[in-house]
Image (cartoon, rainbow, N blue to C red):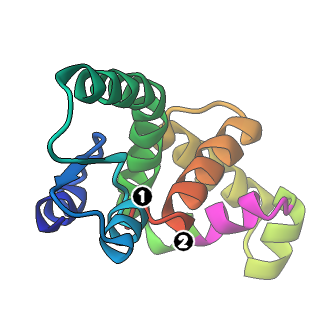
Amino acid sequence: MELMRRLRKQDVFHPCIFTSTKIEHELIVDAMHSGGFGFIKKPFAASQFFELIQKAIEADNQIQQTIQTGLMYRDNRLKLTVREREILDMILRDYSAMKISNLLKISHRTVENHRNRIFSKFNVSKISEMVRIATIYDTLKNIGTLA
């Protein structure tokens, strides 16, 4: 399990399958809460193990794109200036450019310029796209997939 934790800290999120000669409820729960994919008791039939591996590969193919989107959001957000992060947070709360400009005591056009730079850094063109990737990141962070 320590290996899986180290991999997660290095942003490696492929499924991990655990094996053991004992079935200890606490160990299984800890493995699954840490992000493990499956648990199989030794000795096991090769067919049983390969079936579990196939399921892990299928699940991995489905989740990798989502994880990459979350990582991209996290990494790009860190590259924003303090002001850009402040404006992004307000955009994600559905504040209008006019409301943001009033709250920050800057011009409406300055808000639009910041918004355009933010969108450019994230390679999005619409607020809905920005909300989608921010939601993916928040979800992955809340379930413990991303730090």
Q: Give the tally of numbered discs.
A: 2
Look at the image and tell me whether residue 48 can be seen: yes
Q: Is residue 52 above or below residue 106?
A: above
Q: Amino acid at mark 2?
A: Arg
Of 74 and 66, nearer the camera is 66
Q: Nearer the viewer, residue 43 or 66?
A: 43
Say left or right for 38 vs 138: left
The residue to which callout 1 is attached is 145
Instruction: Kindly indicate the quadrant of the structure image that contains residue 101.
Output: bottom right
Label located before the other in sequence (1 or 2)? 2
Residue 68: percent from the left, percent from the top?
Answer: 39, 38
Q: What element does badge 2 sit on?
A: helix
Count neighbours of disc 2 (C-alpha within 10 A) and say few if under 14, some if 14 to 19, many if 20 or more: few
Residue 147 picture quarter: bottom left
Q: Main secondary structure of the magenta part?
A: helix
* First to last magenta residue range: 86-95
Q: In whole angstroms, how far apart are the C-alphas of marks 1 and 2?
A: 28 Å
User: Depth-wise, is mark 1 or mark 2 nearer the camera?
Assistant: 1
Q: Amino acid at mark 1?
A: Thr
Residue found 82% across the figure and 58% down from its top? 97
Give the residue at mark 2. Answer: 83
Residue 100 on image: x %, y %: 79, 69
